[in-house]
Image: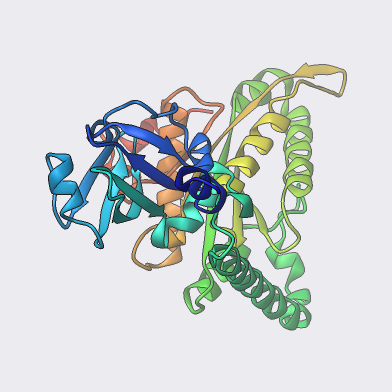
Amino acid sequence: MISVTDLLLAIRPLHVCIGPTGHIRQVGKSFCKLGIDDPTGSRFLEVFEILRPAKPASMSELRDLAGQVLRLRLRAEPGLGLRGLVVDDRADGAILDLSFGIAVVDAVQRFGLTAQDFAPSDLVMELLFLQEAKSSAMAASFSLNARLNGARLAAETDALTDGLTGLHNRRALDGALARLGQSDTEYAILQMDLDRFKQVNDTLGHSVGDAVLKRVAAIVRSQTRQDDLLVRAGGDEFVVVCPGLTDDLRLTSLAAGLIRAISEPAMIDGQDVTIGASIGIAVSRMVVRCDPATHVSRADVALYAAKRSGRGRHLFWTSGMGDSLADLDLPAAQSRGG
């Protein structure tokens, strides 16, 4: 006959068995993916913090909560919220059957969880499929709107295109932001500024500088999606608007790829040229919905913070940064410096 502990291991990947002394006797197989050491043998209340409805101080108090669902979190991962059903094991211990609740999407992305990390009867995989389908539908809707407007936009191509790089210009960006402000599409904005470009322009000449900008434009095209709006906003400043893309991991990968490719040394007009790039990112879902121009300003603030923290990196905008360069502790005149 299969034991209770073996049964739990087979069907409940996120359970915790607690002995009469309050020490963890067994955990489910999925715990190894949550970024913590094996907690077996540790005191339960030293590994987990119970938030509500009560904070038991002993095993007796924990068993008194049998049948209730607790809100708790791992002390080593305080940002990871969990729900746990308390079950009295009838041997002076307790069993907690855990789940991620509404945070499951973030947990799957953060820890690389798969269907094997959830109980076979769990609806998580179906919910994740629906979430992905929703994101794809939103991206497809934005793409369809862009195609329907294609004929009208074609007539404005020259007025909306940067003559040097062939990317869109500031006027095109303003129009795209206005349309985003009237839609329900979520999006991300990447503000990118080249590091050491002014030095290249001043020492090697404007023809080399123009060639560098064209090379950067080609890299941006190669790293982005067809529906992304690519803008040279002026000088060595670039903006990428990503409709339907709000996942932090994918945005991190995009920013890192751009910085890595742009930072590769290049031979231009017989000259060895090495520049870099810094990027600030603002995501529309991160805050209460506001005007897209505000998100552009926030991405600019994050870009400035990336420059100030050492360049050659990307940062996401956070509320602590403020909405504009004027909110920072240094004047905007010191913002970038090439």
Is residue 219 left or right of 100 when viewed as pictured? Answer: right
Is residue 183 left or right of 309 when viewed as pictured? Answer: right
- Percent of width and height locating residue 158: 76, 66
Is residue 150 left or right of 300 when viewed as pictured? Answer: right
- Percent of width and height locating residue 222: 79, 46
At horizontal 31% and vertical 27% (from top left) the residue drawn is: 42
- Percent of width and height locating residue 314: 52, 36
Would you say residue 308 is visible in this rendering? yes
Against 190, residue 158 (above or below) is below
Is residue 176 left or right of 59 when viewed as pictured? Answer: right
Q: Viewer-proximal residue, 170 or 288?
A: 288
Against 198, residue 252 (above or below) is below
At horizontal 16% and vertical 58% (from top left) the residue drawn is: 53
How many numbered marks, from 0 up?
0
At horizontal 40% and vertical 34% (from top left) the residue drawn is: 305
How did the renderer colour the structure? rainbow
Q: Viewer-proximal residue, 198 or 33?
A: 33
Q: Viewer-proximal residue, 204 or 287?
A: 287
Quadrant that contains the C terminus: top right
- Percent of width and height locating residue 19: 29, 36
In which quarter of the view is residue 199 placed?
A: top right
Q: Viewer-proximal residue, 54 or 3?
A: 3
Against 93, residue 71 (above or below) is below
Q: Residue furthest right?
A: 270
At horizontal 65% and vertical 57% (from top left) the residue drawn is: 169
Would you say residue 248 is visible in this rendering? no
